[in-house]
Image (cartoon, rainbow, N blue to C red):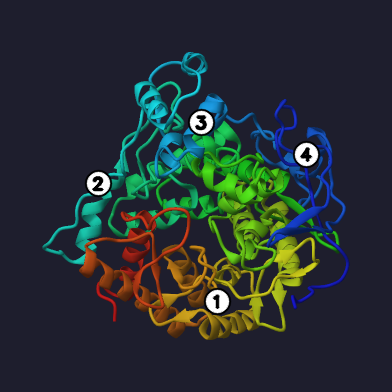
Amino acid sequence: MSERAGGGSASRDRSSGDLSRKDAVFPPTRGPRREQHGGSRSPRRLGALVRGSTGVIAAVALTLLPSTATAQTAPAPSVAARAYPASPAELFGALFDQVQRRRLFPDGKTFADATPRRAPAAIMADYARAGTLDDAGLRAFVLANFDVPGPGRTAPPSAARPPLAEHIRALWPQLTRPPLTPPPGSSALALPRRYVVPGGRFREMYYWDSYFTMLGLEADGQHALTRDMVENFVSLIQRYGHVPNGTRTYYVSRSQPPFLYLMMDLVRDADRATQARWLDALLAEHRFWVGQRTATMPDGARLQHYGDGKSTPRDESYREDVATGQGDARVYQDLRAGAESGWDYSSRWFADGRTLATIDTTTIVPADLNSLLYGMERAIAARCRALARPCAATFERAAATRRQAIERWLWSERDGRYGDYDLAAARLRDGVTAATAYPLFTGVASRSRGARVAATIERDLLAANGLRTTAVATGQQWDRPNGWAPLQWVTVEGLRRYRAEALARRIGTRFLATVEREYRASGKLLEKYDVEESRAGGGGEYPTQDGFGWTNGVTRALQQRYGQRAR
């Protein structure tokens, strides 16, 4: 049984999305949620939903804040969703559909990242004239009209196996890209400064990945590159009103866990004018989350959930989404929302706790997102105060209000953990996950609850080779037995903040030892690891990638904390 966290019902505000567009993805009404269990589906009750026009969006955008907040914040993009740039699926319609469904390329991201050699309209006119094409003909047409990217470039491992820290320092130039002005028709987004990519199939800059990458850049003295990446993210907010999931047109309809305020904290030499511009960006990002991702809890408190402004199959995983969603727009949007969470995919988002087809991410109020937004509100308040702006008290109150709601609705007294609130079931979801460490990471938790969370982590998530992501094995990559570098760091830092240093050290050094062992064996740093067997992680929609930005960054930060070699 799931633990009921208080009484009453909660609802999700359906005020997100660009409602002015003809292809607006949020219909004016939404029927009952339907779950798939095997071959049958049964209705799922949802609370009353708040619907309306973009005027309603503006009205609810600052519901966490007193009514004076709008006047006190600096000018920034409207909270109403902006028109998204056209993605490859939208530009190339039937051609894109056929290329992806027929799996012309093993990785669906390949065609999404291809660059057309001429105007999309001209390509589509020729495709219509070509008539029915077999696979060979379709492939020939694509290769004649698009520059198709090859496998992500990663230097072959050195047989010499230099020390791990030295190897990572040598990887930074390989993963660094110059400022980007994409060619016409490309799905890439322009970036004014240098940036670091994760590696492998991930050829672009990603949002939450970049914070953990920056930890390593800072450890290795790459301060200017950290600042360049922060400026890129600020530029994205100025253009789109939020930080996209990654720097591709097909990522713009969603974001990722909001770590920008923590990235900014890594830059120590920004002048007052820069700090003012960065504060404006944070204010805009905050408006995005509270304006387009808000849920109302049973007591009227407002917290945020993950979402997406579209309800179609993802361009980069089109074939997989079509197979999962079977034409159900609600499933497509929940798949997209799962991608916004960064945990794509995990039992956290499954109604039955096991099966991807039951995904219902948008009906879940998550502990990690709301803890990060608490941290963002505290950071905005501090920056308002430092710049003598009249918004400090407003955001201090917003943070205090959020903290009360997290402590009431996202805490399990029975289990000694923070978790995710199920809006449809009006209760906390079962199961401990590494997201329980986020309220410690950002300082939401009381000392007593922090101590209980530490005990829960030690009992349920600590493995022989690092921190498990969840305690459930589903075959999904964000479940047991995988351990991910960002979650190791969040947990280590959260535990240290609550004086559980011994446990933090055990997690950190065990993970370092896992990274070191795999590096000695294969010469690679990987995206994820099996922390039960100390080997490459598995699961997910694509093979385990190497490179790898956030693993490099967290490894260097942990080495700096606990020594060059794991003990």
Q: CA distance from mark 4 to mark 1?
A: 38 Å
Q: Which residue is tagged 4?
A: 57
Q: Point out the tag, 1 or 2, that comes first from the N-terminus.
A: 2
Q: Is residue 223 visible?
A: yes
Q: Which residue is tagged 2?
A: 173
Q: CA distance from mark 1 to mark 2?
A: 37 Å
Mark 4 vs mark 1: give the one in front. Answer: 1
Q: CA distance from mark 3 to mark 4?
A: 33 Å
Q: Please state, as top left, top right, bottom left or bottom right, where the C terminus lies in the image.
A: bottom left
Residue 96 numbered mark, or none: 3
Q: Do the residues bearing badges 3 and 1 touch, measured as CB atoms within 8 Å?
A: no
For badge 3, the amino acid type reads Phe
Q: Point out the tag, 4 or 1, that comes first from the N-terminus.
A: 4
**Structural crowding at the residue carrying mark 4, measured as other residues with C-alpha within 10 Å and reported as few (<14), some (14–19) or many (≥20):** many
Residue 80 numbered mark, or none: none
Q: Position of residue 141 (x, y in %)?
A: 39, 23
Q: Point out the tag, 3 or 1, that comes first from the N-terminus.
A: 3
Does dot 3 land on a helix, a strand or a loop?
helix
